[in-house]
Amino acid sequence: MMFTPKVTIREAEDGKGYYHGYGGIICTHYDRKLLYHGGGINGFSTRIARYPDEQVSIIVLTNIDAPAAPAPVVSIANALAAILFGEPYELPKGRQAIELDPAIYDAYVGQYELDPEWIMTVTKESDRIFTQWAGEERVEIFPESSTKFFMKVMDTQRTFVVDETGKASHVIVHQNGRSRVATRVN
């Protein structure tokens, strides 16, 4: 029952949508049926991915998790599946922080809304810049350019987009192979 479709999450034109069973997700990945479940709480995160027709299971477990900086279990599971099925994949990129005038951070300080439940606050403390999702821990971000920043604790990046006033109008959050826009609200 866990992997019997009960609710349509997203229907695709080709019929390959995402469906929710009793706790599991049913979808197509690399043109193969995928059944998965993931989650985490206070110190760990998981991803269990089953490709039943290929008799392949991928299980990724981590205990290096924090609410504001979850480990990239989804991207790890997806990369392992790509390797197994001969699909293209990318190795994680090493990132190098650059020296940047901390005055640049002033244009980024504020709050950004990903959706009404997800507000990210950007703060500056001395020569350092931090992001914090509502109700979660504050995490330092490091510059790799004047607008692009990364976290050292997980594979996630932030790209600030500056408008004609010289302040960031929004930030693009890059995580787990997705990019989402959070709009400045103050």
Image: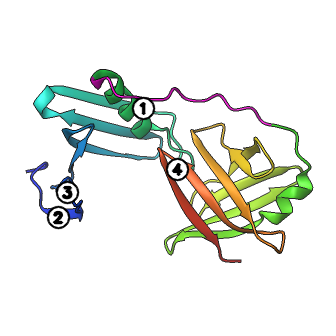
Q: Is residue 25 left or right of residue 73?
A: left
Identify residue type, mark 2.
Answer: Val
Circles 2 and 3: CB atoms closer than 8 Å: yes
Mark identifier at residue 157: none
Residue kind at label 1, given as amino acid type: Ile
In the rendered structure, which disc, 3 or 1, sits on the residue that comes first in sequence? 3
Q: Is residue 167 magenta?
A: no
Measure how far apart labels 3 and 4 are at the Cα level: 26 Å
Is disc 4 in contact with disc 1, using a CB cutoff of under 8 Å? no
Residue in view at x 74 percent, y 32 percent: 96
User: Left or right: 74 with respect to 2?
Assistant: right
What are the residue bounds of the magenta stretch? Answer: 85-97
Q: Residue furthest front?
A: 14
- Return the disc, 2 or 3, that comes first in the chain's sequence: 2
What residue is pinned by disc 2? Answer: 7
The residue singled out by tag 3 in the image is 19
Q: CA distance from mark 4 to mark 1?
A: 18 Å
Q: Quadrant of the C terminus?
A: bottom right
Identify the residue position indicated by label 4 in the image.
Answer: 67
Q: Magenta stretch mostly in which secondary structure?
A: loop
Q: Give residue 27's position: percent from left, percent from top.
A: 21, 48
Which residue position holds label 1?
A: 76
Q: Earlier in the sequence, mark 3 or mark 4?
A: 3
- Between circles 3 and 4, the one closer to the viewer is 3
